[in-house]
């Protein structure tokens, strides 16, 4: 005759607050695991390890977890035409709209990692003065950005990497709100690199960045004090407004010919015209800045 053992009482149902917290923790863990897996797959597409320029896999995974939150839930990024991104070496050429921090570049890079097939680790080309800043420069390098010198860009492309450049340069950071989405003249360095590496160029129109932090001043004395090319001041300081981002990836452009001044200038005008058209179409398709 066996002794009777009462059944254990059922575990109490988790409180709603605990259940919500557990759900958020689980979603965060799944996102972190997805980022690590996609980072590994993206880095494997480059024939040289990206660590040679300062990229650090564990740090990048943590930083991308932060940018993913902004990408998914703050800026609510829509990426159109990402499927047209060529495999192998590619140069992304975008309009520059973020003024205080480079959220536009971060959203492009995060979109290519999270939504690209295959996932791509895009190396942003940064102004060498910005890359030398003690905190921002180090953080940018850990996530894959590099000093935007021509030889560095060529080395990355020859290794099969994807790079992101803003040919308007730092002049775009001084653009007033009334002139938003009006492209500044392009530098020609990106054309020389594309011709030297036979890398296709994909124009990327960023819609939303110009409204995230409208600047009201850009004092030269502050730029000299900080050692930066510009020092744009916005009413939101470093916290951007939650403008909805829309990214439009255009068709690849293949440049051919000798790198003579006339040919280079003509190619730069062609790419600028394609990007202007993409920006215009993106603005026409937008119905609201924040929704």
Image (tube, rainbow, N blue to C red):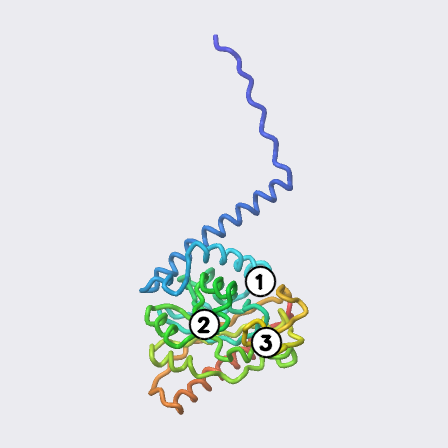
Q: Which quadrant of the figure has residue 17?
A: top right
N-terminal label among 1 and 2: 1
Residue holding disc 1: 76
Q: Which quadrant of the figure has residue 281?
A: bottom right
Can you say which quadrant of the picture contains the C terminus? bottom right
Q: CA distance from mark 1 to mark 2?
A: 24 Å
N-terminal label among 3 and 1: 1
Q: Secondary structure at mark 2?
A: strand
Q: CA distance from mark 2 to mark 3?
A: 26 Å
Q: Which numbered marker is on residue 283?
A: 3
Q: Crowding near pointer 3: few (<14 within 10 Å), some, many (20+)?
A: some
Left-right relation of 51 to 244 = left
Residue 58 visible from this viewpoint: yes
Residue at the extreme front of the image, as rendered: 225
Q: Which numbered marker is on residue 125?
A: 2
In the image, 281 versus 74, the foreground residue is 74
Foreground disc of the pair 2, 3: 2
In the image, 289 versus 103, the foreground residue is 103
What x and y, as percent, mark residue 83? 44, 67
In the displayed structure, 205 sits above or below 47; it is below
What x and y, as percent, mark residue 171? 55, 80
**Count the marks: how many?**
3
- Cβ–Cβ under 8 Å for marks 2 and 3: no
In the displayed structure, 22 sits above or below 59; it is above
Q: Secondary structure at mark 1?
A: loop
Residue 291 visible from this viewpoint: no
């Amino acid at each position: 005759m066996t002794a009777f053992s009462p059944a254990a009482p059922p575990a109490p149902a988790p409180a709603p607050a605990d259940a919500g917290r557990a759900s958020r923790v689980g979603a965060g863990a799944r996102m972190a695991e997805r980022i690590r897996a996609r980072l590994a797959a993206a880095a494997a597409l480059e024939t040289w390890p990206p660590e040679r320029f300062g990229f650090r896999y564990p740090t990048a995974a943590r930083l991308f977890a932060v940018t993913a939150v902004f990408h998914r839930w703050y800026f609510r990024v829509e990426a159109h035409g990402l499927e047209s991104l060529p495999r192998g070496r590619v140069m992304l050429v975008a309009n520059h709209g973020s003024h205080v921090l480079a959220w536009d570049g971060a959203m492009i890079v995060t979109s290519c990692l999270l939504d690209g097939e295959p996932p791509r680790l895009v190396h942003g080309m940064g102004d060498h003065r910005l890359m030398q800043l003690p905190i921002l420069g180090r953080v940018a390098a850990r996530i894959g950005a590099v000093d935007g010198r021509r030889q560095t860009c060529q080395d990355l492309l020859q290794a099969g990497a994807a790079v992101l450049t803003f040919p308007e340069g730092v002049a775009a950071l001084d653009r007033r709100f009334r002139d938003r989405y009006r492209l500044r003249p392009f530098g020609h360095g990106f054309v020389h690199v594309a011709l030297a590496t036979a890398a296709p160029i994909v124009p990327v129109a960023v819609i939303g960045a110009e409204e995230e932090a409208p600047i009201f001043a850009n004092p030269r004395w502050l730029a000299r004090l900080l050692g930066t090319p510009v020092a744009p001041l916005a009413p939101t300081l470093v916290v951007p407004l939650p403008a909805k981002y829309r990214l439009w990836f255009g068709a690849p452009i293949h440049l051919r010919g000798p790198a003579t001044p006339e040919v280079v200038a003509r190619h730069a005008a062609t790419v600028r015209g394609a990007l202007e058209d993409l920006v215009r179409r993106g603005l026409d398709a937008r119905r609201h800045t924040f929704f």
